[in-house]
Image: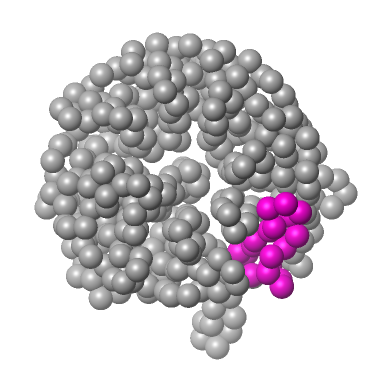
Amino acid sequence: MIQILLFFLAVTLQAQQPLRTKPVEKLIVSLGFRDWGAITIAGNTVLAGHPNDGGGIYAIDGTTGKQKWFHVAPKSEGNPSVSRPAVVSGDTVLVCYGKYLVALSLATGRERWRGPAPFDNSVPIIAGNMVYMTDAEGALNALDLATGKILWKTPFGENRNYCGGQPALRDGVLYSTAYFEPKGRHAIAVDAKTGAEKWRTFLKAEYARTGVCLVRLIATSEGVFATGDQFLLSFDLATGTPRWEAKKQLRRDERGFPKGFALWSLTDAGSMLTALSDIGLHLIDKTTGAFAWTLPGKFTDRPMAVSGDILYFIGQPDGVAVVSKSGMLHALDLQARQIVWSFARAEDKYNWSFHHMAPFDNGLWVDHYGVLLKLQ
């Protein structure tokens, strides 16, 4: 589940003032269950789901920590758990349940409409009065934000080998993945107004007959960037042409032999990309795909978030005193390439890791064992 979530929680908020000093817990929210889903901030409201059997999504007052409202789908209509982040525009909140996408009022939590079932690792994108989503069959959909009416739907090949990479939107173009016979998996671009295809690029790999399975896409002014299997790729925005001389198949030396490794939580950090692997946190040159800098340590599949020139991440960098074996929360100055603070709960009797995060001005909401924490 965590692997699914991390695709959607890499947040870049350049206008925010980052948290540069070691934080303290300003609010502790506990509603009687252990696990929280991804966190979304909408003004003074904090939205977070419950990913286990009870399910549902909670709206929390960001000042008092009190519950504003709660919404849950009936179990008779599928799994009510909510692990993916809510998406907000104005007074509309989009929530991914197992069998449908639901639109709620941010003020009251009342349901407004239901849309198609979302793919199991995809979150909708809102742009103006349009909602873009990948449905359970692997088709791209455009919906009206006010009504949920499907405006266009573009199926892409067969679903049996679909990877469901999270779509990205830039300058009126959607970038995603698709499966086309006879070759297999492709990166694709479609017109966001009409759903018409603009280009497709086969994700060829020597060991994978059906192509690379992309799990994370980012569209920036420099190009489309993606990770999947043990590859790091980039494509031209307009044509889909690979930007680097070859796909970056990720290899490291292990006891004198090359060994492949995967990248997690690919994140746009302005002039560079960031990503995690099991051996380090990496800053990646957008022009060449080369690793410009690596912070060695022990890391797992966890989200990261950018606020200004500070990168928030979870893990155990080398040289930082181990306070929590399950993984501490850290802030990295991207310019100086130095850790400016590390944080662990004073009492961590369960040896529990942080999982999700959402930055706000001079602060950060995170989850831990049974609680949401407001750090400032």
Q: Quadrant of residue 248?
A: bottom right
Which residue occupies the extreme bottom position in the image? 256
Residue 347 on the magenta segment? no
Rendered location of residue 304, percent (x, y): 39, 53
On screen, 154 above or below 163? above
**Image point (65%, 26%), residue name:** 142
Q: Is residue 154 left or right of residue 63?
A: right
Question: Quick one: 56 or 13, which is closer to the camera?
Answer: 13
Q: Is residue 154 left or right of residue 91?
A: right
| Residue at the extreme right of the image, as rendered | 182
Q: How is the image coloured?
A: one colour
Q: Quadrant of residue 149?
A: top right
Instruction: Work out whether residue 376 can be spotted.
Output: yes
Residue at the spot x=34%, y=52% of the render?
Answer: 307
Q: Position of residue 341 (x, y in %)?
A: 21, 62
Query: Left of 350 or right of it: where is 259?
Result: right
Residue 210 point in image, percent of width and height: 78, 54
Vertical arrangement, residue 247 with respect to residue 369, above or below: below
Residue 99 visible in rendering: no
Residue 232: image location, x then y, percent: 61, 64
Which residue: 22% across, 47% down?
362
Number of numbered labels in the structure image: 0
The range drawn in magenta is 229-248
Q: Residue at x 27, y 59 (%)?
A: 330
Magenta: main secondary structure: loop
